[in-house]
Image (tube, grey):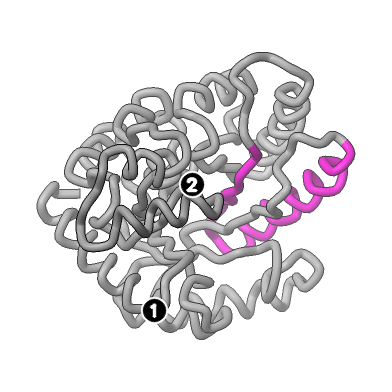
Amino acid sequence: MKIGAIADCFRLGFKGGVEAAAALGVDGVQVHATYGYLAPENITKDVAREALDIVKSNGIVFSALCGDFGVGFGDAEKNKIYVDLSKKILDLSLDLECGIVTTHIGTVPEEECEKKETMRKACRELAEYADSVGAVFAVETGPEKGYVLADFLDSLGAGGVRVNFDPANLVMCVDDRPEEALKYLGKYVVHTHAKDGIMLEKKVKEAVTIDETQKKHAQMLAMGEKYLELPLGTGDVDFDVYLPALKATGFDGFLTIEREVGENPSADIALAVNFLREKMKKFDL
């Protein structure tokens, strides 16, 4: 497996983020392609060549692009806009020599309903388009349990749809164990996020009493917060169980570090790189 980092997490702009990631010795970067430097409205062939040159000149590659517009695919009218924009990002992924676009599609309902069929139609169209151009459209885990997403993806009947596996989202949002979700989703995984966190309600119920942790969690719950992202190794993702389970699926791609919060994301990402290196050595990944 290889270690990556989301360049945007460094909060240094595209070039600065790529350089910061490369300085940590990672193998690749994922970059947002819905806003900023690589947004669809900014992309030309020249911009794509420049972006690829910046990454390659730093001795790394693109692990994937993030194509998340923050709206999902549950609204048929909005889908007319965002499906086409997502196709443009799939095209860009090929220009940037990675061929993987990750996104959130919204929460997949467990039961059949109009919203689920709307999501299915949009995702099938994107999957078929990805098939036709030689790219993959990777749905990120988290809003629903693994078996629900797997059943939905199975129903699409198109090879161009895959999974961006985020173990922390499963733990934080739906109290699903990553190693359990992999039993259903392992065949689809083409990219992963290395992230950690906790579900606040679960922790309060367990009466965590480390320093002011319990009080802090209760206060966050009172403000409507449901989960807390944490540095790798300090949350509820059991990497000693998860990583061997991921290896067992045959996955040999990127563990891409995502650190969306915190006062010093660069320091947290550096710690995450060392954490992952230790685990990769331990489990021969």
Percent x, y of residue 242: 26, 40
Instruction: Decide whether residue 141 is among the magenta residues.
Output: no
Outermost residue to the left: 282
Give the residue type that dot 1 points to. Asn
Which mark, residue 128?
Answer: none
Question: Is residue 108 depicted above or below 221 in this figure?
Answer: above
Identify the residue at horizontal 50%, vertical 63% (top origin). 30
Which mark is nearer the camera, 2 or 1? 2
What's the magenta region? 77-106
Between 50 and 255, the one nearer to me in the picture:
255
Residue 275 in sight from this viewpoint: yes
Percent x, y of residue 43: 75, 70
Percent x, y of residue 176: 38, 32
Which mark, residue 264?
Answer: 1
Identify the residue at horizontal 69%, vertical 52% (top origin). 70
Identify the residue at horizontal 26%, vertical 43% (top origin). 207
Task: Determine the secondary structure under disc 2.
Answer: loop
Outermost residue to the top: 112
Give the residue type that dot 2 points to. Lys
The quarter of the picture where residue 23 lies is: bottom left
- The kind of secondary structure the magenta stretch mainly shows is helix
Dot placed on the residue nearer the N-terminal end, 2 or 1: 2
Question: What residue does disc 2 label?
Answer: 226
